[in-house]
Image (cartoon, helix red, strand yellow):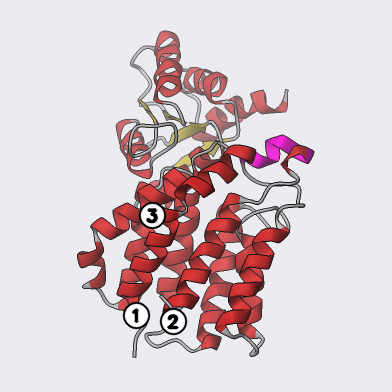
Amino acid sequence: MGLPLEPLLDTVAARIIAAADELTALDSAIGDADHGLNMKRGCEAVLADKAAILAKPQGEALKAIGMALVMKVGGASGPLYGTLFMTLGKELPEAPTTDDAARALAAAVLALKARGKADFDNKTMLDVLGPVADHLASGTATFESVRTLAAARAEATIPMKAIKGRASFLGERSIGHMDPGARSSQIMIEAVCDVLEGKA
Amino acid sequence: MTVGIVIVSHSPDVAKGAADMVRQMVGTDVPLGFCGGNPDGGLGTSVEKILAAIDAAWSEDGVAILVDLGGAETNSEMAIEMLPAERQGKIVICNAPVVEGAVMAATEAWGGGTLAEVKRTAEELAAQ
């Protein structure tokens, strides 16, 4: 059985849209105060195109979600989240096991490193997605442990000094704030876990 | 034909202003495209607008893109990857300040500089 794409899409988009103000507030502390608005615009574009997206095979649907984000987000997070979804679309088999998910997410992390010219501990979304990919590959992952890890890794960006993006202009002053991209990644992971576990 | 210049700023006003300064230097002899603003018109950048600007500035001698901040560069890279392979190899993103870089790059292009020369001229600014 394939992934429950419609509830996944609905829940991820709804949670990101609901968190738009929080994400923008985080971005206002260390960036240009547009992450929530940009992600909301991107998610609304995906929802507006939902029927056409869901009519495609799973891999193509994920790529179409990525392309909608690329075209509509309007910030660096567009190409970054676009790359994430397009890579998942390319790498995820129709009915992925946890190992498949680990491999696909690891491929997406590599693609994101290249796209953002970033690495771990730069205070970015990679600091959530990388450890989650590793954890999925460990063979010990449960929905609860993935949610807990994602939340802890988003928190772990607070004491980091930003090396990439506009937050890096702040140097030491970027310390003490959660990275907005790490937070949006955590929200998405939590939404995916909730749907797959039947809690959303 | 000369190398074309594309200006990508988060601000439509900055992009337009930089383009005005380029035009003042080189008139309409250099193909020029510019864009600014997210898909809703607010501050930000848009892959769709960048693709249109590349199209407007297209030259078989190549196109040099000047960007301001992070997202302008990332979205420009994304736009380039969406173009046919034969075009991709003729586009470069310059590591230079957007306004000064655009004027310097356009002046070099107007003088007959190759794409590599245009890029190098713009990037001399970054080394200062």
Q: Can you tell which mark lies on residue A4? A: 1
Camera sees residue A76: no
Residue at the location (59% across, 85% down)?
A142
Both marks 3 and 1 on one chain: yes
Q: Are marks 2 and 3 in contact (CB under 8 Å)?
A: no
Chain under label 3? A
B92 in relation to B83, above or below: above
Residue at the location (27% across, 77% down)?
A57
Residue at the location (63% across, 54% down)?
A124
Q: Which residue is mark 3?
A: A69
Q: Are marks 1 and 2 in contact (CB under 8 Å)?
A: yes
What is the magenta range?
A166-172
Secondary structure under the numbered disc 1 in the rendered image: loop
Q: Is residue A150 left or right of residue A156?
A: left
Task: Measure the C-alpha gap from mark 2 to mark 3.
Answer: 23 Å
Camera sees residue A22: yes
Which amino acid, mark 2?
Answer: Leu
Q: Is residue A9 left or right of residue A143?
A: left
Instruction: State the predominant SS element of the stretch in magenta.
Output: helix
Task: Measure the C-alpha gap from mark 1 to mark 2.
Answer: 8 Å
Task: Measure the C-alpha gap from mark 3 to mark 1.
Answer: 20 Å
Report the mark closest to the observer, 3 or 1.
1
Q: Please, which residue is most extreme toward the front here? A: A199
Chain under label 2? A
How packed mark 1 is, by other alpha carbons closer than 10 Å (few <14, some 14-19, many 20 or more), is few
Residue at the location (66% across, 72% down)?
A149
Q: Is residue A55 left or right of residue A123?
A: left
